[in-house]
Image: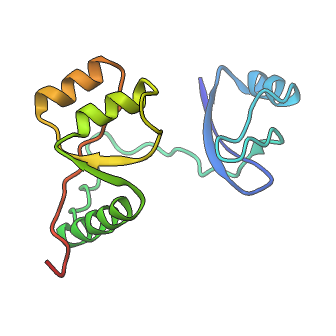
Amino acid sequence: MILYELRCPSDHHFEGWFRNSEAFEAQQAAHEIACPVCGDKNVDRALMAPAVGRKANSLPDPAPQPDPARAITLLRTLRKVIEQSHENVGERFAEEARKIHHGEADARGIYGHTTEEEAEELADEGIEVARIPWVPLADS
């Protein structure tokens, strides 16, 4: 297998695995490779840095330390966006999510609260939900 960095005319970069260079060229000629961002099928190989191996005794670079302040800022921004664009259904979240899923209520973005059990039941029913840490706003 060979890994290529690919790009489309809009300069979106993405990776693709191919059995060999001939397989890439055949798929490219048949326009079977599409940019995952814009769908353009005029995809070409981008310049890549060669994969240079490390010495067996060298250690990998340490992972960067997380920035808690940045994480809190991002979560606050996410909260504001959700509050502005979704309806707060509070404790009725599981009930309302089911109604929307079954077409018994208008499709719309909602947020609220569920128990762990309710969240598991929704997932078992094929209803996608996401738990998001609800951090206090800066002015709270």
Q: Where in the figure is residue 107, as x and y percent of width and height? A: 47, 39
**Nearer to us in this view, 53 or 117:** 117
Quadrant containing the C terminus in the rendered view:
bottom left
Asked if residue 16 lies left or right of residue 88, the reply is: right
Residue drawn at (35%, 44%) of the image = 55
**Residue 59 in view (yes/no):** no
Residue drawn at (44%, 42%) of the image = 53
**Nearer to us in this view, 101 or 128:** 101
Residue drawn at (49%, 46%) of the image = 52
**Up-down relation of residue 42 to residue 127 (above or below):** below
Q: Where in the figure is residue 58, as x and y percent of width and height? A: 27, 48
Q: How many marks?
A: 0
Q: Where in the figure is residue 47, as x and y percent of width and height? A: 69, 52
Residue drawn at (29%, 48%) of the image = 111
| Quadrant in the rendering for residue 1 | top right
Q: Where in the figure is residue 54, as x and y percent of width and height? A: 38, 45
Asked if residue 140 lies left or right of residue 21, the reply is: left
**Nearer to us in this view, 27 or 69:** 69
**Up-down relation of residue 18 to residue 97 (above or below):** above
Q: Residue furthest bottom?
A: 139
**Residue 8 in view (yes/no):** yes
